[in-house]
């Protein structure tokens, strides 16, 4: 099948016409990763075999685990390769439920990814008691609620490190101290944080953490679960006993190799994200100064350097998204995993915003190869589109 010119423009190249501002949904594969795929594809052996065809795949597995462990400040054998962030979340939460003995109470933030919230909803059908930690309209957790609800019956507290829609970073160190004071464990969905902010899991006090390769310019199909030694564990997938019998199934070596390569670029991460943050901050200042009735969620909070969540009054988010898409600009109105739903963002609703406010939301998430000219074009287009939508709405009223 031939690839059309339009499809070709979807590649990771800032000189092409497509402007991609939805990196929290997924990141494009880094061009250097694309170049290396033919080489890695030659290492097709099963890493569980003992003959020479398995040696290179086994080496890729070992070296990626080692370099990722160094990045996260943990031991390599505390990392388990999975199929993605959703599997990692499910494994951590369900495993704790099956191994938590007499503890049957769980605390989970109300703005988690669906793979966390829906897993806890499932556990409730099995008898688990779940309390949801509220957040205010800036995305800040109610720590007093945690202090009030947590007890020696609590098995786990689950809070994401950084929210995928607002970018607001959670006070995980404080939450971990509260949890550990009563003997509870801490799980964190760290999917959005990898490659954007420094992560040292031991310093944060996290016992289990979930990651996904495709949020860090790598191939889809690989996730990682950090599972601290000594923490109760129950494997979710049984079979051949891979990953030290913690996750059966032949490892996705091609995707794991791409993740390992991106982790090897860790010394560039800070510099690139400073550039991204400067672009994001300049973009927000221009939006506020040039478009009326705009609010930025979490503006005064510690946020991911690439994320901006906006309310643009008088403009439907889906209408805005489609108009921008026609101009070659890719944005989001919320979490990509909730696409197709007719309901506005559950995260924004959980933060106390009205349905109407949530429907006027726009999420912008920048990446490493976005540049000033792209942001300038986006801003010019956004101003025109918002003005047109508002003028049409006024005429119809």
Image (cartoon, grey):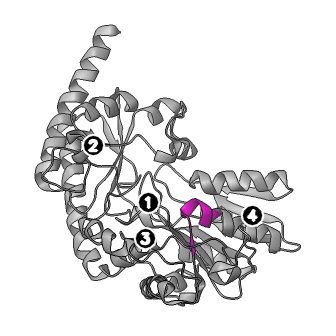
Residue numbers of the magenta segment: 81-89
Tell me the distance, in whole angstroms, between the alpha carbons under discs 1 and 2. 42 Å
Question: Disc 3 or 1, which lies upstream in sequence?
Answer: 1
Q: Quadrant of the C terminus?
A: top left
Q: Residues within 10 Å of mark 1 (few under 14, many from 20)?
A: many
Tell me the distance, in whole angstroms, between the alpha carbons under discs 3 and 4. 36 Å
The disc placed on residue 168 is: 1
Q: Is residue 110 visible?
A: no
Question: Disc 2 or 4, which lies upstream in sequence?
Answer: 2
Along the line of sight, the residue nearer the viewer: 154 or 196? 196
The residue most toward the right is 102
The disc placed on residue 106 is: 4
User: Which residue is depicted at the point 13% across and 46% down?
Assistant: 376
Q: Quadrant of the N terminus?
A: top left
- The residue identified by callout 3 is 254
Helix, strand or loop at disc 4? strand
State how many labels appear.
4
Tell me the distance, in whole angstroms, between the alpha carbons under discs 2 and 3. 24 Å
Question: Disc 2 or 3, which lies upstream in sequence?
Answer: 2
Helix, strand or loop at disc 2? loop
User: Which residue is depicted at the point 54% across and 86% down?
Assistant: 202
Quarter of the rendering containing residue 317: top left
Q: Position of residue 248 (x, y in %)?
A: 67, 73
Q: Are marks 2 and 4 in contact (CB under 8 Å)?
A: no
From what the image shows, is residue 116 above or below residue 270? above
Q: Residues within 10 Å of mark 3 (few under 14, many from 20)?
A: many
Q: Are marks 2 and 3 in contact (CB under 8 Å)?
A: no
Helix, strand or loop at disc 3? helix
From what the image shows, is residue 203 above or below residue 294? below
């Amino acid at each position: 099948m031939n690839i059309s010119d339009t499809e070709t423009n979807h590649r990771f190249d800032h000189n092409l016409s497509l402007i991609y501002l939805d990196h929290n949904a997924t990141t494009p594969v880094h061009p250097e990763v694309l170049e290396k795929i033919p080489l890695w594809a030659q290492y097709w052996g099963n890493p569980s075999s003992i003959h020479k065809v398995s040696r290179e795949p086994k080496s890729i597995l070992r070296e990626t685990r080692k370099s990722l462990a160094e990045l996260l400040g943990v031991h390599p054998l505390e990392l388990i390769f999975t199929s993605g962030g959703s599997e990692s979340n499910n494994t951590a939460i369900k495993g704790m439920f099956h191994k938590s003995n007499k503890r049957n109470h769980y605390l989970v933030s109300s703005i988690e990814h669906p793979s966390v919230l829906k897993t806890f909803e499932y556990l409730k059908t099995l008898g688990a008691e779940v309390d949801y930690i509220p957040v205010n309209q800036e995305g800040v957790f109610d720590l007093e609620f945690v202090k009030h609800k947590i007890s020696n019956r609590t098995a786990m507290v689950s809070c994401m490190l950084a929210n995928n829609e607002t970018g607001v970073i959670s006070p995980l160190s404080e939450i971990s101290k509260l949890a550990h004071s009563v003997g509870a464990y801490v799980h964190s969905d760290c999917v959005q944080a990898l490659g954007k902010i420094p992560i040292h899991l031991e310093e944060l006090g996290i016992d289990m953490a979930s990651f996904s390769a495709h949020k860090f310019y790598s191939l889809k199909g690989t996730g990682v679960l950090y599972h601290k030694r000594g923490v109760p564990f129950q494997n979710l997938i049984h079979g051949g006993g891979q990953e030290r019998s913690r996750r059966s199934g032949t490892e996705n070596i091609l995707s794991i190799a791409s993740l390992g390569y991106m982790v090897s670029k860790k010394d560039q991460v800070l510099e690139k994200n400073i550039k991204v943050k400067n672009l994001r901050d300049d973009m927000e200042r221009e939006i506020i100064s040039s478009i009326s009735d705009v609010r930025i969620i979490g503006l005064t909070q510690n946020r991911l350097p690439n994320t901006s969540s906006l309310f643009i009054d008088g403009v439907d988010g889906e209408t805005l998204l489609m108009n921008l898409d026609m101009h070659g600009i890719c944005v989001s109105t919320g979490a990509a995993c909730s696409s197709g739903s007719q309901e506005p963002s559950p995260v924004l609703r959980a933060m106390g915003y009205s349905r109407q406010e949530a429907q006027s939301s726009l999420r912008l998430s920048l990446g490493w190869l976005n540049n000033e000219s792209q942001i300038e074009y986006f801003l010019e287009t956004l101003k025109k589109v918002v003005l047109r939508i508002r003028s049409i709405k006024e005429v119809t009223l």
